[in-house]
Image (spheres, grey):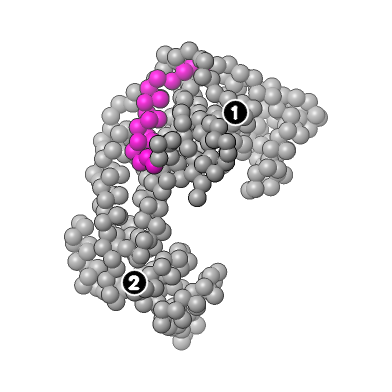
Amino acid sequence: MSSTIVTNRLAAVFDNPRNRGDHIWFLFEKCYESNVYPHTPRWCARSIGRIREAMQMIVMDASYCEGGMLRDRKGSITPETYIRRWYRAMRHPVQMPQMHIRLKREDLRCQFRMTSDPTDDQRWEDFCSRMREHGRKDIPLALDADKEVTLSLHEDIELVLAVYGTSRERKTLLAPWKAFGGEWAPERSPRATIGYYPPGGQIPSPVIPRAYRIDDNALVMPEDGAWRAAGWAYSAVGDYVKGLWETELHAPGSFEVLIPPYREAIMAAPVLPKGSEAVVDLTNCESRRNVLEAVELTGGRIEKDPVSGQEQARLPWSIETGHKLAYLPHAATTWHLPEVVATDAMKLCA
């Protein structure tokens, strides 16, 4: 399995000249892929945006450390270590220099074609729409006329963010590194007078999940009260970390308090009790064939509602067949545990 190896990181920032006090952050990582030789670290712009977008990238990328997909040269690191290192970098950022970004229609269309979703035509329409939103319908018109358009990184930052910004709420049109021509970071820039020293916030109490082990996979009860397979144990922890970015934004440092107990609860979860079963709604189930194979393997059964005609598969869990049940279609599957055992587990975790 390939991993991304991070060897260095750099935060850059500037104060928006059109709105003083509005700090725009640029996050760069120097990295290489473990299965690509030679191992030559190269700079890559990972995020462009305000502190909200920066925190989204940092915390969500940190989740990949849990399973070893993101490491440093010495080996695996925890999400906590990854976030800690970014905080250190953002306390001492460099000044993001003024630059000019040149746009050409053919270049944009070519870059759009290199993305898989949506199509390049859809992305071009999205680009035109975003320019119009900022009162710059002249830009698509100029590009359509095969004219080159130059954006000032500082003066036109809203337009730059519309194309290269890394907001999770609005799909990024083009990867941030494409704004700077690839493998580059402002290493030689002077230190900025701006640093990230956020005020403390009210850190919420740790969440201790209700969890069992199917095999190496975890079964977790989310807020809706229904037991759900959460994938490999490390994946369950990673998914939890991903959801912490907004908490971290409002209560900096909360990751240190929230992640360790959640991880401990998932890793120490007991094995499912005897009598547990997975129930799969076969209505419009895309993986029906796989479910039926699992029914045969586990000695399960198919039940049909005589009135509605809807079918569901009931598959008993055992240690021997747990690996098969762990990969039932997530959205269509709920888990039923023996009532007494499930109630006792909830009391213990409360």
Is residue 83 magenta-colored?
yes
Q: Is residue 164 left or right of residue 267?
A: right
Direction bottom: furthest residue: 306
- Residue on which disc 1 sits: 183
Direction front: furthest residue: 38
Estimate the x, y position of residue 226 in percent, counting from the top left. Answer: 34, 64
Is residue 107 visible in the rendered structure shown here?
Answer: yes
Residue drawn at x 38%, y 46% is 66
Estimate the x, y position of residue 5 in percent, counting from the top left. Answer: 48, 37
Q: Nearer the viewer, residue 130 or 41?
A: 41
* Tag of residue 168: none
Q: Is residue 286 above or below residue 211?
A: below
Q: Is residue 94 left or right of residue 317?
A: right
Estimate the x, y position of residue 149 in percent, counting from the top left. Answer: 72, 24
Residue drawn at x 30%, y 49% is 263
- Marks 2 and 1: in contact by CB < 8 Å? no
Q: Nearer the viewer, residue 178 or 67?
A: 67
Residue drawn at x 50%, y 78% is 292
Is residue 20 magenta-colored?
no
Kind of residue at disc 2: Ile
- Residue on which disc 2 sits: 319
Q: Is residue 126 above or below residue 313?
A: above
Residue drawn at x 52%, y 15% is 188
Q: Residues within 10 Å of mark 1 (few under 14, many from 20)?
A: some
Q: Residues within 10 Å of mark 2 (few under 14, many from 20)?
A: few
Q: Is residue 181 above or below residue 75?
A: above
Q: Is residue 295 above or below residue 41?
A: below
Kind of residue at disc 1: Glu
Is residue 207 visible in the rendered structure shown here?
Answer: no
Label 1 and label 2: CA atoms lie apart by 49 Å
Start and end of the magenta stretch? 76-96
